[in-house]
Amino acid sequence: MKIKIELKLSRFIWLFDSLLKVLLALEDVAVYTQPVFEDPSNVTAIAGNNAKLQCKVHHLENYTVAWVNPRGTILTRGYLKITDDTRISTDRNVDEDWNIIIRNISFEDRGFYNCVINTAPFPSVNRVHLHVIVPPRIIGRVVHAPVVVREGETVTLVCNATGYPLPKIHWFRDRITNVTDLPGDTLVIRNITRHCAGEYQCRANNGLSREDTRVFKVEVHFAPEVSMLIPRLGITLGSETVLQCSCSSSPIGVCVWKKDGRDLRISGKYELNPYNEGHETITLGLTISHIQEEDLGRYECHAQNELGQDSGYTDLYEYRPPVPPTHAPTARPTPRLITPDSGYRPVPTKTQKNIFDDEHFVFFRPSTIKTPASKYSSESRSSSLGVAFCTLVIGFIGLHFFTSLSL
């Protein structure tokens, strides 16, 4: 009896062990066949474009995949689209793909989207982050009229922009020159001058290739300024001349030539020739024909606009060229001829200093003109006798000097 009980117990233990092994094997099979997600990939898209959110599942078996947006709204379940948002649709290229496409995304679509499988006891979740970049956009009313200020005032230009990431704003003049080193949505120009007039452009950029711009046209008004090309001009009677002046103002106003307080009009005597030198400056030429004495005097170039007036002047006077002298030129003295009768002639030295250093000494030289001996005067013979006498005296003095030395 005891042996039978032990045999039955051993069979029971064997059956229990076999059943336990079967249960463990079934459990391993169940674990192996659980749905598996591929690694999720986050998505970055530009607002206005389409975004594709991917969810790839292996071993789905009889489970169901659903998409839930960041606000908890179910978008799809299995093959069916639950939401009424027409921008959303499913995209399945293969059986493992459970993707959705969001068209024309906006900044409000950003956040985490959940791909959910209804496993037990807890659902399996794969999170996909949608990062939305919004291109910069300058807000506010577009003003096409120019910003008008007076010279010396302060101008403030404002350019607000939205976008994600938050855009930076830089200012450019005439769309080329960067007028500020640091970005900012406000440009202030203090004590503005006419040289600051022009177009100012703000550019909003947040790293995307697209940027938004807006242009402000600044006009600086100032009172007229007149400059004269020639303030004083001499002219001969009967000729023709041209006077010129330059008038600068904003707005341009009026620029005229005057004489004796009255405006000069186009006539046979006067002709006006305006030339545009820019939107703020004109050059006004005045041609005066066949000038007479009554045309001489002061001419005024007068400019005026709503901010003031200014004048410049040119004095026109008669120019009389110098008259050449009528008397005959002074004749040069005729050189005197030295004749043989004059004996010796003085020749003052000019190129070298007198060896005696005395201005009273004069050198003489014999005349080089050969004449017959019969033509020499008695004065010439007496001169020869004087020379001989001097030679005799000098010889006597020399003899006396040597005699005294010998004694």
Image: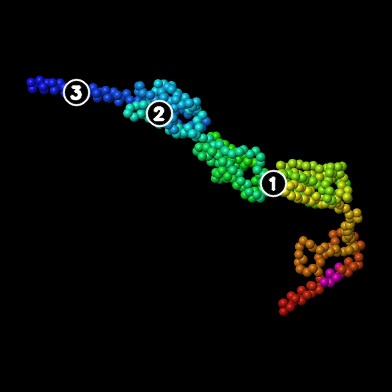
Pick whichever of labels 1 and 2 is earlier in the sequence: 2
Which element is circle 3 on? helix
Magenta stretch contains residue 388: yes
Quadrant in which the N terminus is drawn: top left
Dot in front, 1 or 2: 2
- Using the numbered discs, state the Cα–Cα distance from disc 3 to disc 2 in whole angstroms: 42 Å
Residue indicated by mark 1: 221
Above or below for 300 versus 93: below
> Residue at position x 79%, y 72% from top?
395
- Residue at image location 41% in from the left, 21% down from the top: 94
- Quick check: is 118 in the magenta stretch? no
Mark 3 vs 2, N-terminal side: 3
| Residue in the picture at 87% in, 45% down | 290
Q: Earlier in the sequence, mark 1 or mark 3?
A: 3
Position of 113 compared to 162: left or right? Answer: left
User: Residue 136 vs residue 77: left or right?
Assistant: right
Work out whether 329 lies above or below 20.
below
Can you give x and y, in whole percent of width and height, for residue 191 in the image? 64, 50
Task: Give the class, few, some or many, for how many residues have Cα within 10 Å of label 1's Cα (few <14, many ≥20).
Answer: many
- Nearer the observer, 318 or 137: 137
- Magenta residues span 384-390
Q: CA distance from mark 1 to mark 3?
A: 106 Å
Give the residue type that dot 2 points to.
Cys
Mark 2: give few (<14), some (14-19) or many (20+) Cα within 10 Å.
many
307, above or below 69, in the image? below
- Residue 91, compared with residue 349, is above or below; it is above
Residue at mark 2: 115
Magenta span: predominant SS is helix
Image location of residue 313, percent across then percent down: 79, 51
